[in-house]
Amino acid sequence: MPGRHSRGGLAGGAAAGDGEDALLAALVPELPEGAWTDLGPGDDAAVVRAEDGRVVVTTDALVAERHFRPRTASPEDVGWRAAAQNLADVAAMGAVPTALVVALVVPRTPPEPWADGWTTGLARGLAAACASLEGADGCGVVGGDLTGGEEVVVSVTAFGDLRGLAPVRRDGARPGDVVALAGVQGCSAAGLAVLERRVRPGAAAWAGSPVESAADERVADLVRAHRRPRPPCAAGPAAAEAGATAMLDVSDGLVRDAGRLARAGVVVLDLSSELLAPHRDAVLPVADLLGVEAWRLVLEGGEDHGLLATFPPEAVLPEQFAPVGVVRAGTAPAVLVDGERYGGAGGWDHFG
Amino acid sequence: MPGRHSRGGLAGGAAAGDGEDALLAALVPELPEGAWTDLGPGDDAAVVRAEDGRVVVTTDALVAERHFRPRTASPEDVGWRAAAQNLADVAAMGAVPTALVVALVVPRTPPEPWADGWTTGLARGLAAACASLEGADGCGVVGGDLTGGEEVVVSVTAFGDLRGLAPVRRDGARPGDVVALAGVQGCSAAGLAVLERRVRPGAAAWAGSPVESAADERVADLVRAHRRPRPPCAAGPAAAEAGATAMLDVSDGLVRDAGRLARAGVVVLDLSSELLAPHRDAVLPVADLLGVEAWRLVLEGGEDHGLLATFPPEAVLPEQFAPVGVVRAGTAPAVLVDGERYGGAGGWDHFG
């Protein structure tokens, strides 16, 4: 029957009297057109240039109360994160992000404490991430879909261009390679710990107001790192050019994601606490505040969306990368820290 | 903290002990690899060939109890529909479907009466649609994401290749053009009416068993048309080759979607009841059974995902298309039936 399934889509027409299409029409002006966009929202589908002749594709969904909490994350934060984590996956293949689309489930009543009109904030967050992340600034939001439902779901699919290079897969690490990391690690988990334990480093720290002391500022930086993760998108294509043998986006924690590279390549990744020390130092203020071990934040904290890659020993690392370990041969895949199995409370030594 | 957001993804690694990744690993063998796939599930992102140098992109989400009812649609049906409606959007640009990705929200308990393992059925439905729809048989399912949530959401993003032709947009219809339709129209709405009113055309008709009488068979066909819509995907690229001036996927009903072409092109679409008669005849058995007007099913029924296009008068229509009207100039966009405004109960004459 007519109207039973109002298909909408940013790629849907703006039928008079159709609240969904009207809402979509209101969002489109918030969205970046993108440098690779041939045809944006408003038709059955969009058209994005893929000059390489291949397109990199990834999809990731965020669900309210599972991947974010509306009490501690604004709609802008959620839009930012939804874009950032998908852009990181594109970059982790060595590709330049070109475009994304978003499917949004919108409940009748906004989740507390969000207000009506939160979809505009979410669109602004998507746009802000594309505009602000180095290497993603040409990325457009070229289409989408909007539908009713019980809980907020933000499902993003992102695209990228390989510029003639081979995709950097997870399975190419070889004994002797250097393990290198681009981006921060542990900061998002530290920021989340602050938010969830309600340790407020000066009342206004995460309302965006200026903070008072240097210590407060460092804590506020960590909270921002959780709310607005900054994957080093430009580092992905740079790694591909520098000859990276394997790469992935660190979304589930350094040891866990390093384990994925180890298993895929059937090698041992030996991380160095000395090389990782700058990451530990960055989270120390919060670790001290909360009484947690800074190393656990660095080795197990997720959602920073840095890029972990392996490079041949002779490669010149791109400027965004710093070495954090070496690849060794082994009878079974494993992740070591300073040559020993890391048996953090999360129990990440259960493979192999 | 580690594992707080298990990112998964068909493009995620298979970490031991991770239920989500294990579930994903179980789904991958169900999914078609696809003729355009360079790199399928298992890495941060997939790689799909886009030989044209552009990629067509569309996204559409289905939410339980809004876009389908688990009581009347099997997981296979829902997977099929999720694929079909996105493939139709790709075809409606004149593109050949090449690949799709799916983000799935999976509640802890399956919706009644679905059983555990329904995600496998859904994957099979996606695969069956790609394999069965003419023009979509090279389409692969190249990646995805799986996450927990309160209600089932199936969010599909589909891609297509334009093969060097311009995309067929909605806004190109010109006075004098022929309006033509590929695919069925009204059948899905008729089938839904049967399902929702519980008029059972022989008990086993929609359990897939043979039906007894010819009338029952025609009703069963309509139920199938609702559960497994068959967008004529090959007709989209054929229309582009034949010089179609405008095209869209008929998802919200013939008059409503014709209105979108009329508004986009600032023209009048005059449909002919005589030319549409075969569509009316197809739904007559159900219309009679239910006491609804067959014309309303044809003119207002949605979700058949046929393709409505306009062609220059001299064009040779592709075999999948039949003429259903003409484009006329007018002072305001409108849809007419036999030269008069159609004022169906849905009130679709409120534009212009």
Image (spheres, coloured by chain):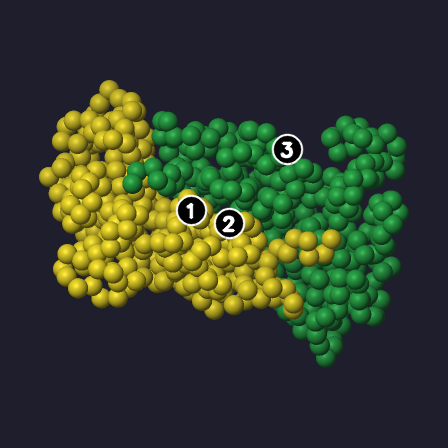
Chain colours: A yellow, B green
- Mark carried by residue A151: 2
Q: Tell me the residue that label 3 is attached to.
A: B113
Protein chain holding label 1: A
Q: What type is the residue that disc 1 sits on?
A: Glu
User: Is residue B19 found left or right of B126 in the rendered image?
Assistant: left
Q: Secondary structure under badge 2?
A: loop
Q: Tell me the residue that label 1 is attached to.
A: A65
Few, some or many residues within 10 Å of mark 2 (<14, 14–19, 20+): some
Few, some or many residues within 10 Å of mark 3 (<14, 14–19, 20+): few
Comparing B31 with B318, the one in front is B31
Look at the image and tell me in which quarter the C terminus of chain A lies.
Answer: top left
Q: Are marks 2 and 1 in contact (CB under 8 Å)?
A: yes
x and y, in percent, of residue B162 in the image: 55, 54
User: Is residue A317 found left or right of B27 in the rendered image?
Assistant: left
Q: Determine the CA span between mark 2 and mark 3.
A: 21 Å
The answer, for residue A171, to whether it is visible in the render is yes
Q: What type is the residue that disc 2 sits on?
A: Glu
